[in-house]
Image (tube, grey):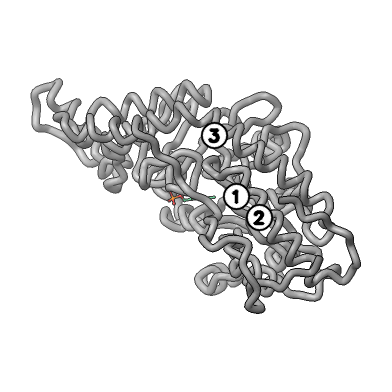
């Protein structure tokens, strides 16, 4: 069976593009937001604390601080650590730019470490050679939702007396050795952007067991002022002090209400993501041109993304051609991520260049993220596989008998 590809004017598998990620909101979510809109508190009110407490319970930490985005959450972690100009923070080469940008916001310097070829997570074997007297922290990022090796990471951080930050914007709901993501590092950040596991429109959260860090971050999200509106009302005083340079990184009450409502559904959504991942993995076993990433037996994967690696040696097509062919079939694939050192800013700022992080680069030239979100139907997931098989039949160098299942 060798159907004409949509990219060559054949009929596409789907007429409507299936996006790579998408939020899901029900009537309860909408009602939760409306209730707050009708209340006295649009921001700085009770829903913020309630959302923070709900997240604490979910991940098993003592403290949570809600902020306006995942990026603000990362920025707050660097502020919490009180880093000074010239301090260094280890970051992985394959991540979203915000993971490294937050370090520069506080005038410290990101030091890039390459990733492991099987998991594409920060390569623990290469971290220690990058640790020097100025190193103050490691930011690990749970790529695609696969928790990093927190056993090794904590051991390294302890040995060098540095802090461990988890950028867990992909892995809310995941776990490592039965311990929830959020409780595995000194500070952990989440994002509530619509493509992430739960959404508040824009939004983020930091979780920690360190009350001092939490206190500093609460101040940081409120201009660096040591008392918020409620503290002043309680003490019936107008006096406050700005003790440090902070920002307005607050999350509004109606956003927090949406977050609380969304979080109730997260366990079911994670199960659905795992179901889709299992279907992809089983289906792709018949397609040697396209390989899923390895999953460690130590973790429960949260499957924010489903990246696959193209085996270009087996294909008569480039990554770009496969990408465009899938898009033409109506499959909204994406690529996560352009490595940090490919960005012109980082080349100028850190003096890094192409060739410096070969594993991240090799992966980047082969990566494609397949659609992955809980509201996808079985039909949607099957369409993804049909499109892949159709495209592989066309471009494969090997003659593989593939049964396209309908
Ligand atoms: C989404 C994301 C962020 C940033 O979160 P925003 O809420 O969009 O600011 C940071 N790091 C990673 C790994 C992300 O995926």
Q: Position of residue 134 (x, y in %)?
A: 58, 51
Q: Are marks 3 and 2 in contact (CB under 8 Å)?
A: no
Residue 324 circle label: none
Q: Position of residue 165 (x, y in %)?
A: 55, 40
Given the current orientation, which residue lies at the most extreme right position? 399
Whether residue 333 is visible to the viewer of this picture, yes or no, is no
- Horizontally, residue 84 falls left or right of residue 301, namely left
Q: Identify which residue is drawn at 85% across, 68% down.
A: 314
Residue 172 image offset from top left, x and y in percent:
54, 36
Chain-order first, disc 1 or disc 3: 3
Question: Label 2 belongs to which residue?
Answer: 384
User: Which residue is rendered at x = 50% and y = 71% of the image?
Assistant: 345
Q: CA distance from mark 3 to mark 2?
A: 19 Å
Residue at disc 2, secondary structure = helix
The answer to whether 105 is drawn above or below residue 295 in the figure is below
Residues at discs 2 and 1 in contact (Cβ within 8 Å) = yes
Q: Secondary structure at mark 3?
A: helix
Give the residue drawn at x 63%, y 55%: 370
**Closer to the camera in the image, 362 or 160:** 362
Gap in angstroms between the C-alphas marked 1 and 3: 16 Å
């Amino acid at each position: 069976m060798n159907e004409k590809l949509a990219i060559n004017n054949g009929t596409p598998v789907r007429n409507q593009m299936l996006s790579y990620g998408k939020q899901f909101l029900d009537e309860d979510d909408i009602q939760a937001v409306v209730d707050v809109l009708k209340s006295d508190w649009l921001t700085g009110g009770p829903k913020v604390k309630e959302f923070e407490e709900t997240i604490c319970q979910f991940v098993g930490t003592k403290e949570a601080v809600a902020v306006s985005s995942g990026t603000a959450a990362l920025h707050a972690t660097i502020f919490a650590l009180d880093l000074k100009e010239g301090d260094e923070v280890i970051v992985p080469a394959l991540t979203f730019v915000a993971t490294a940008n937050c370090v520069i916001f506080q005038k410290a310097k990101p030091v890039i470490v390459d990733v492991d070829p099987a998991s594409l997570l920060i390569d623990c074997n290469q971290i220690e050679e990058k640790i020097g007297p100025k190193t103050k922290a490691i930011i690990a990022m749970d790529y695609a939702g696969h928790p990093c090796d927190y056993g090794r990471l904590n051991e390294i951080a302890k040995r060098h007396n540095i802090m461990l930050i988890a950028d867990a914007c992909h892995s809310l709901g995941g776990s490592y050795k039965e311990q929830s993501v959020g409780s595995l590092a000194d500070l952990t950040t989440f994002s509530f952007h619509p493509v992430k596991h739960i959404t508040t429109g824009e939004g983020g959260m930091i979780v920690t067991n360190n009350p001092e860090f939490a206190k500093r971050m609460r101040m940081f999200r409120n201009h660096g002022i040591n008392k918020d509106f409620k503290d002043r009302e309680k003490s019936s005083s107008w006096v406050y002090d700005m003790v440090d340079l902070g920002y307005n990184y607050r999350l509004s009450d109606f956003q927090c209400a949406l977050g609380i409502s969304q979080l109730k559904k997260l366990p079911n959504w994670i199960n659905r993501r795992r179901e889709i991942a299992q279907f992809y993995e089983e289906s792709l076993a018949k397609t040697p041109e396209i390989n899923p990433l390895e999953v460690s037996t130590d973790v429960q994967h949260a499957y924010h993304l489903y990246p696959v690696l193209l085996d270009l040696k087996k294909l008569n097509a480039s990554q770009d051609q496969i990408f465009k062919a899938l898009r033409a079939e109506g499959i909204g694939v994406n690529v996560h991520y352009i490595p940090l050192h490919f960005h012109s800013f980082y080349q100028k700022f850190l003096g890094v260049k192409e060739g410096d992080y070969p594993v991240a680069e090799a992966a980047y030239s082969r990566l494609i993220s397949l659609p992955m979100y809980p509201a996808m139907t079985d039909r949607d997931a099957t369409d993804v596989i049909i499109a892949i098989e159709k495209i592989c039949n066309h471009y494969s160098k090997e003659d593989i008998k593939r049964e396209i299942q309908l």
